[in-house]
Image (spheres, rainbow, N blue to C red):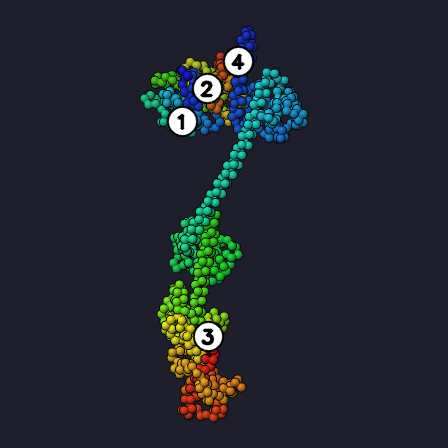
């Protein structure tokens, strides 16, 4: 800035005048003009909300009011501000002097200045500090008045500015608190919207497609729901890949472990995934497709709440499946044990199964390498699916009972189960039951057929009770005394020998006769060497004294072995 | 008030011959004062002559003639100048040159058919390091002589963020009216031109 334009002193100009009255008048006008200037300066200071502006204006106004200089401001909090606006240290000894002055004003000493005075800076009801002004000479009382007014007005203006600053700070804090509150309310409202929307889906029965659609609408991102193996259960939004990509088993297991461990949304490449697992054996994965990584807090809330709703849905579905499974199991057990027709038909209808057609019971026995019963049940189900057969399957005394209306190729089913289990499989097929209450009879027939197949017939296979011929005739006799006597007559010595020696002569004889006297086939069936077979047959001849090649002997022995098998099966059954 | 003209600022009316010093803070406040003052003059059909400190301010004010100017008058109703061609023409400030500028401007406008004049000057030029700027207060005092004898109102604009308190006090002493934050402060004891010259020569 250039040099300050100076106001000439009208009083000085008039001093040479010979008219004292005019000089006095000009002096008075000058003083009154100065008061107007003070009034305007006061107005300017009062309207200012900046403490620096106020103090700068006060300091720069001083030379306009007389031979003044404002050296600085000393505040009660210990701060010093020079008249030029610089912070720093107060001149030495000033602080002690000001403390002694208290709330009043008074003379102070400043280095290099002839005269200096501390004018109090007062707020509305407290002392803010002092304005330190100095002159090259001792000023007149009139000159002192102007600077005193400046100090008073500066004090009030500074107090107002500080009050205003505090109010602004308070207002800013309130505004910030309001903004934070508004943000919280907006966030809560959005969370409530998310909960409401997804809760509607949960109760609407829209299922997994409904959950995916709702989450897509809430986030604007494509949504996938997958089962534990990565198969797609539902999709909503654009960009669905066809075919749906499936990751490797190891990678899938790794992702599931991360989801279980973190128990929160986890980023998996372009997806944000979360686990929905209402119980350890039920797992689903809910994924937001987010290649741009723009999912924010509300999206994560929606995803997590979506996972909760999906868990409920998965639990519901599994519950339905479990209930249906239990009802089916109970129905099958009751059908096999014997139940009344009306009850069975109603329950079957509830399970959407038509039991009004004639059914039969098929019993499947087999043994795999591990978890025999479950493995057998699954093997039977798979074999039935391959054979396009429907029916109710259930485990039954270590075997699997199938209640079916179909007429499958049971030999083929037997081979399929045997291959699946990598072990033998014996199937017994009961006779048809026109009504559900007759299925217990079909079960007995199936059991008999299955045991005959297992004990008398060769290898894995199926035995159909209605086609049993002589076996069926023997099994149907109410009095077995004569049959027993006949068996004892022809096979008694061999039976006793087997019992005594834990041998298998009756079984060997049975297989020999069933294979039409063929040594190779019989040895293969018995899994013994041909010489062993020949030894056993000689032993049989020695013990019975019978000639096996005699047609009459052959017929009676074959009838006796079949009767023995039938009796054995009947006794086992009972 | 009979015989007064609207200032266009905060419902304040002015008597013809008024020389008002207006204090403001920052460009927005200045633009508010200038647009109100000149807008009222343009709406009333006054000749408006204005000196502003920058091209940017000049361009903003030009839009006023399009929105508020009265059609039918010869010549431009609003003349806008910069300090380089007015206060500081020739590279220095002289009071006489500037008073001539205003007087000739009013004479020319009178020939064009205007009967009332509205003058405004943004005084920031006085802060430049140019010869003669120290004569600002004397100029302000002399300007009272021009205004008192013409159908004119004059507004001198001082930015409180730039001018020191000492200049503010001296400006107040030489202006019969001071406009501060919407308040028109009368100063019947202002230093008139004759008194100023006498003091300065003494």
Is disc 1 surrounded by few (<14), some (14 to 19) or many (20+) residues within 10 Å?
many
Dot 3: chain letter: A
* Nearer mark to the viewer, of 2 and 3: 3
The alpha-carbon separation of the residues under discs 1 and 3 comes to: 104 Å
Q: Is residue A255 left or right of residue A357?
A: right
In the displayed structure, A276 sits above or below A99; it is below
Tell us which disc is closer to us: 4 or 1: 4
Disc 4 designates what residue?
A29
SS assignment at label 1: helix
Q: Earlier in the sequence, mark 2 or mark 1?
A: 2
Q: Which badge, 4 or 3, comes first in the chain's sequence?
A: 4
Q: Quadrant of residue A10?
A: top right
Label 2 and label 3: CA atoms lie apart by 116 Å
Kindly identify which residue carries mark 1: B61
Between tags 4 and 3, which lies in front? 3
**Image point (41%, 72%), residue name:** A439
Mark 2 lies on residue: B20
Q: Secondary structure at mark 4?
A: helix
Disc 3 marks which residue?
Answer: A366
Kindly report which numbered mark, 1 or 3, lies closer to the viewer in this rendering: 3
Query: Tag 1, which chain?
Result: B
Residue A441 percent coordinates (x, y): 41, 75
Evaluate whether label 4 is on the same chain as label 1.
Answer: no
**Which type of secondary structure does the marked residue at label 2 adopt?**
strand
Q: Position of residue A406 (x, y in %)?
A: 37, 71
Q: Are marks 4 and 3 in contact (CB under 8 Å)?
A: no
Chain containing the residue with disc 2: B
Question: How many angstroms separate mark 4 from mark 3 (CA)?
Answer: 129 Å
Local crowd at mark 4 within 10 Å, few (<14), some, or many (≥20)? some
Q: Is residue A548 left or right of residue A36?
A: left
């Amino acid at each position: 800035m250039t040099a300050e334009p100076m106001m000439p002193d009208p009083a000085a100009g008039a001093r040479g005048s010979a008219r004292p009255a005019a000089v006095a008048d000009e002096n008075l006008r000058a003083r009154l003009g100065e008061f107007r200037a003070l009034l305007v300066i006061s107005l300017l200071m009062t309207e200012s909300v900046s403490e620096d502006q106020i103090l700068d204006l006060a300091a720069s106004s001083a030379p306009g009011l007389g031979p003044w200089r404002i050296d600085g401001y000393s505040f009660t909090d210990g701060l010093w501000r020079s008249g030029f606006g610089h912070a720093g240290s107060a001149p030495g000894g000033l602080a002690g002097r000001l403390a002694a002055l208290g709330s009043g004003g008074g003379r102070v000493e400043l280095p290099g200045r002839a005269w200096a005075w501390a004018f109090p800076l007062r707020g509305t009801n407290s002392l803010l500090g002092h304005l330190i002004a100095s002159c090259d000479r001792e000023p007149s009382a009139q000159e002192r008045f102007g600077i005193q007014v400046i100090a008073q007005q500066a004090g009030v203006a500074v107090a107002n500015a500080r009050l205003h600053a505090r109010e602004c700070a308070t207002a800013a804090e309130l505004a910030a608190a309001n903004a934070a509150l508004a943000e919280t309310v907006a966030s809560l409202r959005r969370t409530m919207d998310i909960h409401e929307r997804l809760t509607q889906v949960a109760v609407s029965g829209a299922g997994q497609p409904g959950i995916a659609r709702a989450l897509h609408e809430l986030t604007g991102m494509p949504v996938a729901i997958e089962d534990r193996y990565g198969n797609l259960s539902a999709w909503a939004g654009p960009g669905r890949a066809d075919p749906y990509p499936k990751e490797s088993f190891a990678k899938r297991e790794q992702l599931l472990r991360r989801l279980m461990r973190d128990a929160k949304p986890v980023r998996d490449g372009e997806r944000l995934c979360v686990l929905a697992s209402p119980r350890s054996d039920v797992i689903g994965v809910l994924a937001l497709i987010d290649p741009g990584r723009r999912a924010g807090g509300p999206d994560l809330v929606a995803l997590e709440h979506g996972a909760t709703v999906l868990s409920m849905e998965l639990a519901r579905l599994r519950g339905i499946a479990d209930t249906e499974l239990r009802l089916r199991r109970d129905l099958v057990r009751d059908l096999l044990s014997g139940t009344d027709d009306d009850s069975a038909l109603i329950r079957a209808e509830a399970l959407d199964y038509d039991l009004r057609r004639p059914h039969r019971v098929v019993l499947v026995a087999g043994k795999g390498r591990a978890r025999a019963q479950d493995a057998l049940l699954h093997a039977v189900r798979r074999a039935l699916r391959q054979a396009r057969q429907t029916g109710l399957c259930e485990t039954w005394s270590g075997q699997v009972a199938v209640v079916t209306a179909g007429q499958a190729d049971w030999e083929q089913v037997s081979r399929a189960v045997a291959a699946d289990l990598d072990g033998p499989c014996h199937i017994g097929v009961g006779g048809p039951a026109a009504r559900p209450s007759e299925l217990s009879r079909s079960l007995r027939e199936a059991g008999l057929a299955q045991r005959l197949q297992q004990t008398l017939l060769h290898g894995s296979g199926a035995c159909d009770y209605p086609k049993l011929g002589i076996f069926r005739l023997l099994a149907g006799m109410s009095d077995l005394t004569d049959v027993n006597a006949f068996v004892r007559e022809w096979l008694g010595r061999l039976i006793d020998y087997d019992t005594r020696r834990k041998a298998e002569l009756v079984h060997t004889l049975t297989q020999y006769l069933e294979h039409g006297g063929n040594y190779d086939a019989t040895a293969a069936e018995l899994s013994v060497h041909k010489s062993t077979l020949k030894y056993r047959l000689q032993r049989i001849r020695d013990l019975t004294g019978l000639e096996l090649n005699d047609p009459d002997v052959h017929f009676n022995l074959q009838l006796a072995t079949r009767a023995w098998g039938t009796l054995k099966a009947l006794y086992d059954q009972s | 008030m009979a015989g007064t003209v609207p200032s266009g600022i905060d419902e304040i009316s002015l008597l013809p011959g008024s020389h008002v010093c207006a204090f403001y803070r920052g460009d927005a406040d200045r633009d508010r004062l200038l647009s109100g003052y000149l807008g009222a003059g343009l709406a009333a059909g006054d000749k408006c002559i204005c000196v502003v400190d920058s091209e940017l301010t000049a361009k903003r004010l030009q839009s006023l003639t399009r929105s508020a100017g009265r059609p039918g008058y010869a010549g431009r109703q609003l003349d806008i100048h910069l300090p380089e061609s007015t206060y500081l023409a020739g590279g220095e400030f002289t009071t006489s040159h500037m008073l001539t500028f205003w007087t000739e401007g009013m004479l020319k406008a009178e020939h064009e058919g205007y009967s009332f004049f509205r003058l405004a000057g943004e005084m920031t030029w006085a802060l430049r390091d140019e010869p003669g700027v120290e004569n600002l207060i004397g100029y302000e005092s002399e300007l009272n002589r021009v205004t008192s004898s013409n159908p004119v109102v004059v507004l001198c604009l001082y930015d409180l963020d730039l001018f020191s308190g000492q200049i503010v006090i001296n400006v107040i002493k030489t202006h019969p009216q001071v406009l501060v934050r919407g308040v028109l402060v009368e100063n019947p004891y202002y230093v008139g031109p004759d008194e100023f010259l006498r003091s300065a020569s003494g």
